[in-house]
Image (cartoon, rainbow, N blue to C red):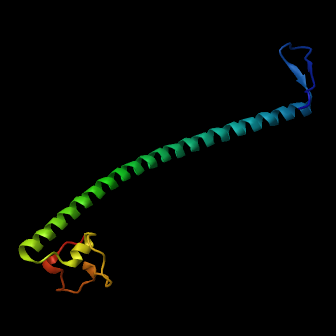
């Protein structure tokens, strides 16, 4: 940056005279500094908001992960119960649970024919024993 031309005022010892061109450059620089400062504050504010949103999203993701693990354990427990009921029925009555029930419980591979969903069935058509929709 070029040096600013100044000279002392004859009447006021606290003031200096500055060349008009240099004064305009100083004003312009001060204005730009204010603008950059304001923009920086705005960007920091936006960054803080995004940081808060990220923290909330990470927290929600952790909650969902915990819930997912809990539900996976529950599904495993329920599948174990369904297996036990199927084995019990096989031993005592010689009849197991319907294949569709085992498929829905994830205990048997789906047959080639896609099972109908309950809302797709016609009136009067039900699972054996109106079984659960898993």
Residue at 15 percent of width and 80 percent of height: 128
| Position of the N terminus by quadrant | top right
Toward the front, the furthest residue is: 91
Residue 14: which quarter of the image?
top right
Residue at 23 percent of width and 77 percent of height: 100
Q: Is residue 55 left or right of residue 87?
A: right
Toward the left, the furthest residue is: 92
Q: Position of residue 112 (x, y in %)?
A: 33, 84
Q: Position of residue 86 (x, y in %)?
A: 15, 70
Residue 15: which quarter of the image?
top right
Q: Nearer the viewer, residue 32 or 2?
A: 2
Q: Nearer the viewer, residue 27 or 1?
A: 1
Q: Nearer the viewer, residue 29 or 45?
A: 45
Q: Is residue 94 left or right of residue 68?
A: left
Q: Is residue 74 above or below residue 20?
A: below
Q: Is residue 22 left or right of residue 38?
A: right
Residue at 28 percent of width and 81 percent of height: 115
């Amino acid at each position: 940056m070029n040096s600013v031309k100044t000279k002392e005022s004859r009447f006021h010892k606290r003031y200096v005279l500055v060349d008009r061109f240099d004064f305009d450059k100083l004003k312009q620089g001060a204005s730009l500094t204010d603008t950059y400062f304001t923009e920086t504050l705005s960007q920091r504010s936006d960054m803080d908001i995004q940081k808060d949103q990220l923290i909330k999203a990470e927290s929600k993701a952790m909650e969902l992960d915990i819930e997912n693990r809990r539900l996976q354990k529950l599904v495993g427990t329920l599948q174990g119960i369904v297996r036990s009921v199927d084995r019990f029925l096989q031993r005592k009555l010689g009849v197991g649970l319907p294949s569709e029930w085992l498929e829905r419980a994830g205990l048997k591979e789906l047959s080639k024919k896609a099972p109908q969903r309950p809302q797709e069935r016609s009136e009067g058509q039900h699972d054996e024993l109106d079984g659960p929709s898993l």
